Amino acid sequence: MPQQIRTTFSLHYTGGTLDRATEKRGDTDWIAERLTHSSSLIAPVWRNRNLIHHHDEPTAVLTVGNDAQKFLELAEDIVLLGIEQENGNTIFAADLSHHDDEAIAPLTNGASFLDLREIGPMMSREEANLLAFARGVMFWHRRQKYCGICGHPTESRNAGHMRQCTNPECGREHYPRTDPAVIMLVTRDTPNGEVCLLAHKAAMPEGWFSVLAGYVDPGESLEEAVAREVKEETGVIVSDVQYRASQPWPFPCSLMLGFRARAISEEITCDDVEIAEAYWFSRDDLKHFPEKGYQLSRPDSIARCLIDEWLNEGD
Ligand SMILES: [Zn+2]
């Protein structure tokens, strides 16, 4: 059974205790029995949105019994998410994206399909982790309706964890994809203490600053991706790249891999495409950010954890 894993940070969208039950995915009899079982729970997904009760603290809606069956009857894809450790209940995700909102509105019972990216920070880590799984895997299903090799339709297999091409001459198996992205806090020693490199991306709200990030190229190690992205975006050269932690970021399908890197050059030259501004900031600068109208990354992000870890080292 899965245990809570000790990690560097307590990151949002991690920390779930669901048994993903990979050994059950091919057991079609067991899956069929669980889908009709009165205790089984359904997490509905609609067009990248999860069903959520939005009260003071938003909570995930996991339907059961007759309500669950209604969602299953309407679902285009169904995925086994896993088994709850404490009670043995099975949880499935059901995708209703092919229905318009009028068709699903009668089923929501006062809850709403909401964007986890917006509301996730207000939810418990456990529930945010579960909904992130449901949203991420359903995004992949909608992207993999057709075979990338021959163009024929694909069909869901292995309780929703594989899609297979229906062309008998092809039959290619397709598995859920996650895009690795590196995200890194770059620091530099100065005679007055350490400083860190933060950037304002053109796409960010005014006054926001965050660490650098970018996608990993094919044939590139994570450490090489860190060094390349920092150089491309700011012209700064780094060495001593150290892994810190990772965070699922299914918005829509990334895995953020967090690093610290030490700069061996000082001059900043922004790429002027993604990065509008970038500066070296001291810990004292960051502590006075709000007074200057500046803001750091959102609190549920690994970006913020990397910054906060560095800030706390100076205390
Ligand atoms: Zn094919």
Image (cartoon, rainbow, N blue to C red):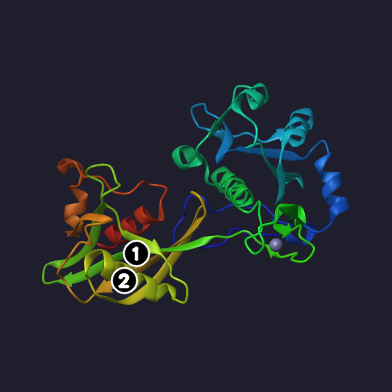
Asked whether the viewer can see residue 83, the reply is no
Q: Position of residue 116 (x, y in %)?
A: 50, 40
**Residue that badge 2 annotates:** 261
Between 280 and 70, the one nearer to me in the picture = 70
Whether residues under marks 1 and 2 lie with C-beta atoms below 8 angstroms apart, the answer is: yes
Identify whether 3 is placed above or below 221: above
The residue that appears at 84% across and 39% down in the rendered structure is 36
- Indicate left or right for 174 with 14 as reference: right
- How many numbered circles does the render carry? 2
Asked whether the viewer can see residue 307, the reply is yes
> Please, what is the three-letter code of the amino acid marked with disc 1?
Met
Q: Position of residue 97 (x, y in %)?
A: 62, 37
**Residue that badge 1 annotates:** 184
In the rendered image, the quadrant that contains the C terminus is bottom left
User: Based on the displayed image, in which of its 4 quarters is residue 207 positioned?
Assistant: top left
User: Based on the displayed image, in which of its 4 quarters is residue 107 positioned?
Assistant: top right
If you read the primary sequence from the N terminus, does the residue marked by circle 1 or circle 2 appear first? 1
The residue that appears at 62% across and 61% down in the rendered structure is 148
